[in-house]
Image (cartoon, grey):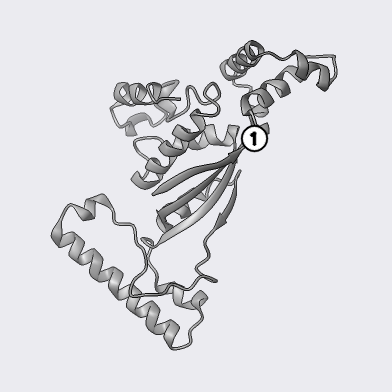
Amino acid sequence: MKVTLLQHTPDPETTVALAARLCYSSIGIDELRERLSRADVAAFLDKIMSLGHQSVLEHASFTFGIEGISRATSHQLVRHRVASYSQQSQRYVTFRGDDFPAVVPGSVAVSARRLELFDAAMRACAEAYRALVDDGVPAEDARFVLPNAAETKIIVTMNGRELLHFFGLRCCERAQWEIRAMAVEMLRLVKTVAPTIFRDAGPGCVAGPCPEGTMTCGKIAEVRKRFKEMPA
């Protein structure tokens, strides 16, 4: 898996602080912008985050390039509707060669027997796909035999508010392992450009009680420590 922060709103924290300050100011935007110091930015962001007034976070957007994830994970990802997605198409991209790239779960890779069964299934899918394409079946129809393990590439854009929601759900220990690994890497990347906004980001238990109730992972102290110590 490879996750890259392709681009983001220039100086996202200043943009968010400016939007927040504007709500309570009678002066014009240009003058307000000139007066806004780094101390003001930090103070307003702290106030916003503590009060839960997160609508201004929508003014900051972040675009990620994600490669080497499975279709099983991309299907989970696109369920987050307040986002924009552009994904490699299995309709217009025809797989060539003897095989197609596939993501192997760790629970499969630890056993030679499991890996043998998995590889056999992947080869069968690849052979069926290739035979259908060679027989003139369009890629958009041949893809029906491709598995959830098939690798994909996707570009994702989310605003700051949606990212906090996304991290709350997908950084959780109870999230599926692949999307959790992806979400944690996305969080690591945005912390480098917006450390105050994402200071307490992560699963719901980082800044409050575990939202999973009786389904809790039981590792709250360990999880909190890990995300609190994540470098910005």
Q: Is residue 176 left or right of residue 155?
A: left
Name above or below for residue 161 compared with residue 149.
above
Q: Nearer the viewer, residue 3 or 181?
A: 3
Say if residue 163 shows up in the picture. yes
Residue in the picture at 58% in, 52% down:
85
Image coords of residue 175 (percent x, y)? 38, 41
Image quadrant where residue 35 sits: top right
Image quadrant where residue 31 sits: top right
Q: Is residue 152 left or right of residue 106?
A: right
Secondary structure under the numbered disc 1 in the rendered image = loop
Name above or below for residue 104 compared with residue 140.
above
Crowd around label 1: few <14 · some 14–19 · many ≥20 (10 Å): some
Say if residue 62 shows up in the picture. no
Image coords of residue 32 (percent x, y)? 79, 17
Q: Is residue 209 left or right of residue 105?
A: right
Image coords of residue 140 (percent x, y)? 52, 75
Label count reads: 1
Q: What's under tag 1, amino acid-wise?
A: Thr
Q: Nearer the viewer, residue 113 or 33?
A: 33
Image coords of residue 68 (percent x, y)? 40, 54
Name above or below for residue 70 compared with residue 218.
below
Q: Residue furthest bottom?
A: 135
Determine which residue is flagged by label 1: 9
Q: Is residue 174 left or right of residue 49?
A: left
Residue in the picture at 55% in, 24% down:
197
Residue in the picture at 55% in, 71% down:
92
Q: Nearer the viewer, residue 159 or 99?
A: 99
Residue in the picture at 39% in, 69% down:
146
